[in-house]
Image (cartoon, rainbow, N blue to C red):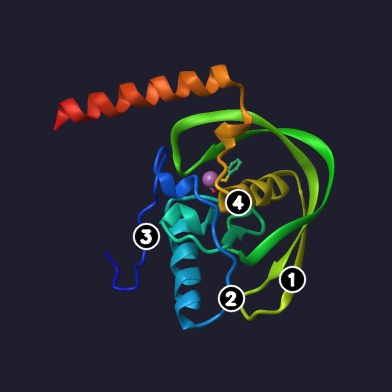
Amino acid sequence: MEETAHEMKIYTYPDPVLKTPAEPVREIDGELQRLIDWMIETMYDAPGIGLAANQVGVLKRVIVFERQPRERRRNPGVLINPEIVLGEDQIKWEEACLSVPDFSAEVVRKGQVKVRGLDRQGNPSDIEAEDLLAVCLQHEVDHLNGTLFIDHISALKRALYKKKLTKMLKEQDEMD
Ligand code: GNR
Ligand code: NI
């Protein structure tokens, strides 16, 4: 492993840290800069197109995301204390989550959003997004509020996923 690698552990469902709302950031200090760098590394290493601090066990309102999720080049974005200030149109997208292993499902969200927060220097930053980036930003803000995409699907589909997960965990247990 490289000496500069700082991938953090990604917590998975049903860990309680994923259900706990994160606290607003009050001070943008060196520790927060380090967290942001590690989150960006962890996101690309996973690989994923977004990551919320809850997912790495830190209850601070910080998200990182890939600004151009369809491009090969890395163009990371950061928002501290993000809020969705505008949402228009509905789209249905097949979502997955690094914290919800081996599952994906269609979720209805806004197709266009404006998300307001602070950049890593502490300056106000508005991100306008559509399609996949809009879905991703809503998914990340949900994480900060303790919500997962499986909270948006039907109770039946969610129950089926829980059953599948229990079976997977049991099989894993029997292996070791
Ligand atoms: O990498 C990710 N891909 C993705 C695809 C469709 C909808 C949402 C996402 S976010 C996910 C990474 C993640 O779990 N972020 O919290
Ligand atoms: Ni997620």
Q: Earlier in the sequence, mark 1 or mark 3?
A: 3
Cβ at disc 4 under 8 Å from ligand 1? yes
Residue type at numbered disc 4:
Glu
Residue type at numbered disc 2:
Arg
Residue type at numbered disc 1:
Ser
Residue 140 shows which numbered tag? 4
Q: Give how far apart the Cα atoms at labels 3 and 4 are.
A: 17 Å
Does dot 2 land on a helix, a strand or a loop? loop
Q: Give how far apart the Cα atoms at labels 1 and 2 are.
A: 16 Å
Does dot 4 land on a helix, a strand or a loop? helix
Residue 71 vs 80, above or below: the answer is above
Q: Residue at x 46, y 23 (%)?
A: 161
Q: Are marks 1 and 2 in contact (CB under 8 Å)?
A: no
Residue at the spot of label 2: 26
**Circle nearer the viewer, 2 or 3:** 2
Q: Position of residue 18 (x, y in %)?
A: 47, 47
What crowding class fits label 3: few (fewer than 14 Cα within 10 Å), some (14-19), or many (20 or more)?
Answer: some
